Image (tube, rainbow, N blue to C red):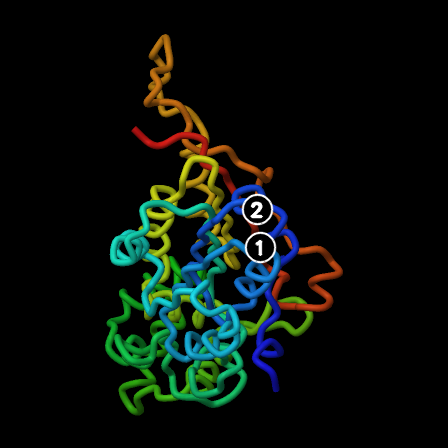
Amino acid sequence: MHISDLHEPVMLDRCIELLAPAIENRDAIMIDCTLGLGGHTESFLNRFPNLRVIGLDRDPNALELAKQRLASFGDRVTFCHVVYDQIEETLAELGVREVDAILMDLGVSSMQLDEKDRGFAYSYPAPLDMRMDNSQGMTAADVVNTYDEPELVKIFKEFGEERFARQIARAIVAERKSEAFATSTQLAGLIVKVVPFIPGKSSGHPAKRVFQALRIEVNGELDALSSAVPQALDALRVGGRILVLSYQSLEDRIVKRALGAASVSSAPLDMPIELPEHAPTLRLVVRGAEQASDQEISANPRSASVRLRAAEKIRQAA
């Protein structure tokens, strides 16, 4: 199987269309904050011959595959094994002052979901891991086996928006007294017993929200995103563009608020005039959040939940 068969880039044509004004007809630099298997980056490099890409990813396995896929582009790609909340220090190390475009394709990748030993999926037995970088940090098993009941309730509610958070947490704490949780199916099996599930009426597998919450907690995803977006906006040149693909409401809310706040005046409501430093620094280039077409969803079901937001930098922050 070819690397390109492992991942279908989401909303690829629209990403190219929206970022093109910032990178065409110039020696441009783009940051791909979530390089993954390099699908988006490969298409951008093919389309824009003067483009260079700085590819960031926390998953060393994905980086190695991306290096193979993008080898023909030589030094037009710089590979960085970092989390995307390290944009500022990464650019400083590379001696890059500003960039023309930034792409963020958030969430877990198709490859990570499909790798059975990573523990992201609840449909087959795997170690309860869920680390995007499996060389460091705590695992999902550490969380479910060591967090107390109130802590579990908190992350299931906040990161999974799970209505049955309290019942699930109580059942986990009771179950682990006799046997620690070690596999994804072991945890999913317990959740199925706790959460009411009506085939055809319930939205998705009963374990879906808990697994999302554990993944976010293990990888610190929302904290990383909250830190990364302001760094990304600072790194853009005036006229540069940022595009973010989110796959669940918690991510999209962070992006929506950050881009929205920078696209309106920051002047106090009672101020009679707007000073230059209060003027917006961004212009939104799509209205609201765009979704994948029915045709794309049919061809690539994992695009069903995507929300695309994009903006152009129109002024340097004071």
Q: Which residue is mark 1?
A: 48
Extreme right residue here? 295
Image label count: 2
Left/right placement of residue 275 relative to residue 257 reads left
Q: Residue at x 54, y 83 (%)?
A: 123
Q: Is residue 313 above or below residue 204?
A: above
Few, some or many C-alpha atoms within 10 Å of disc 2 (few <14, some 14-19, many ≥20)? some
Hey, what amino acid is under mark 1?
Answer: Phe
Residue kind at label 2, given as amino acid type: Glu
Packing grade of label 1 (10 A; few <14, some 14-19, many >=20) is: some
105 shown above or below 108: above
- Front residue of 236/154: it is 236
Image spot of residue 234 (x, y percent): 34, 42
The disc at residue 24 is 2
Residue 187 lies in what quarter of the image? bottom left
> What residue is at 42 percent from the left and 79 percent from the top?
64
Q: Is residue 127 above or below residue 4?
A: below
Secondary structure category for the residue under label 1: loop
Q: Estimate the x, y position of residue 249 in percent, counting from the top left.
A: 49, 53
Badge 2 element: loop
Residue under the image location 35 percent in, 59 percent down: 84
**First reached walking from the N terminus: tag 2 or tag 1:** 2
Q: Quadrant of the C terminus?
A: top left
Residue 232: mark: none
> Residue visible at 48% across and 87% down?
116
Q: In the picture, residue 119 is in which quadrant?
A: bottom left
Pinpoint residue 193: horizontal percent, then vertical percent.
49, 80
